[in-house]
Amino acid sequence: MAYTLRGQVLNTFSENIYINKNLRNKLDSTDMDADSPPAPQKKTRTHESCHRFSKLLLISFIIFLLLLKMLFSVALITLSKKYSQLLDEKEIIKELNYAELVCRKQHLLSKVWSCCPKDWKPFSSHCYFTATGPASWRESEEKCSSMGAHLMVIHSQEEEDFITKILDPKAVYYIGLLDAGHRQWRWVDQTPYNESATFWHPGEPNSDIEQCVIINHRYSGWGWNDIPCSAKEKSVCQMKKIYL
Ligand code: MMA
Ligand code: CA
């Protein structure tokens, strides 16, 4: 008998041909000689079922191989996804290798950690740093940029309240708002300037030559004021939280 399945099938196949040939010879000789004994039918049937079994075995093997291939493909896709995720995380950590990360779990059962660099304050989906400057608006923005951040952008009362609680009421801080010309206010992250979510001090903005914006505390409370961009002030940097 053959050693491999393929060999076995071939072997069975050639045996079958041989038997069929044999049968044909027998039939031919029957035509010529009616007295000859009948062909051994039992043996042929055994070989037929053997052939069917081999066929079944071959089909099962092919299905098994296909399933195996599918399994391998799924495993390969999963692994490559995990690998690229790992590379991304490594890239983020490499970029931030100047800082230790402080991470928290979103929920007790969550697998995701949200992180901010050490000395940055977390709020909602962002991290905030208030110890830059004094420097001009442009230099302050460059400093934030060098840390993978930008000057702070404020879009809600909650964000305004969060930041004012951690700022020094005697200091002045640049935020990421700029006059692009003719009192067209632009946020550094290109998000739209929404008039209904602004926190200008009463009477501000008040001067065309004051094109950069600070946040500070006055007798009336916290608010924004336009000032000349060359003034050296502190600033607030903001970056997205890092999720691991
Ligand atoms: C300063 C300066 C301005 C601001 C006024 C408000 C005198 O200028 O901070 O930007 O608008 O004060 O009185
Ligand atoms: Ca002003």
Image: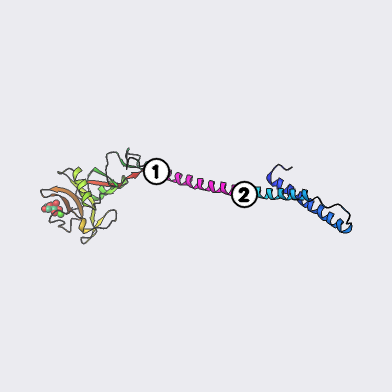
| Badge 1 residue CB within 8 Å of ligand 2 | no
Does 122 appear above or below 228? above
Which of pointers 2 and 1 lies earlier in the amino acid sequence? 2
The quarter of the displayed image where residue 108 is located? top left
Determine whether the residue tagged by mark 2 lies in a helix, strand or loop: helix
- Determine contact: label 2, label 1, CB under 8 Å: no
Horizontally, is 158 left or right of 100 in the view? Answer: left
The quarter of the displayed image where residue 114 is located? top left
Horizontally, is 93 left or right of 177 in the view? Answer: right
Q: For the residue marked with disc 2, what is the amino acid?
A: Ile
Figure colour scheme: rainbow
Horizontally, is 93 left or right of 238 in the view? Answer: right
**CA distance for labels 2 and 1:** 41 Å
Percent across and percent down for residue 81 are 45, 47
- In-front residue for pair 178/21: 21
- In-front residue for pair 94/159: 159
Residue 153 is inside the magenta segment = no
Front position among marks 2 and 1: 2
The quarter of the displayed image where residue 241 is located? top left
Horizontally, is 226 left or right of 106 in the view? Answer: left
The residue identified by callout 2 is: 62
Residue 86 is inside the magenta segment = yes
Part of the protein shown in magenta: 63-89
- In-front residue for pair 220/225: 220
Percent across and percent down for residue 179 are 22, 57
- Residue 89 has which mark? 1
Which quadrant is home to the C terminus? top left
Q: Is residue 233 at all visible to an observer of this figure?
A: no
Q: Few, some or many C-alpha atoms within 10 Å of disc 1 (few <14, some 14-19, many ≥20)?
A: some
* Residue at (77, 50) in percent of width and height: 44
- Residue 200 has which mark? none
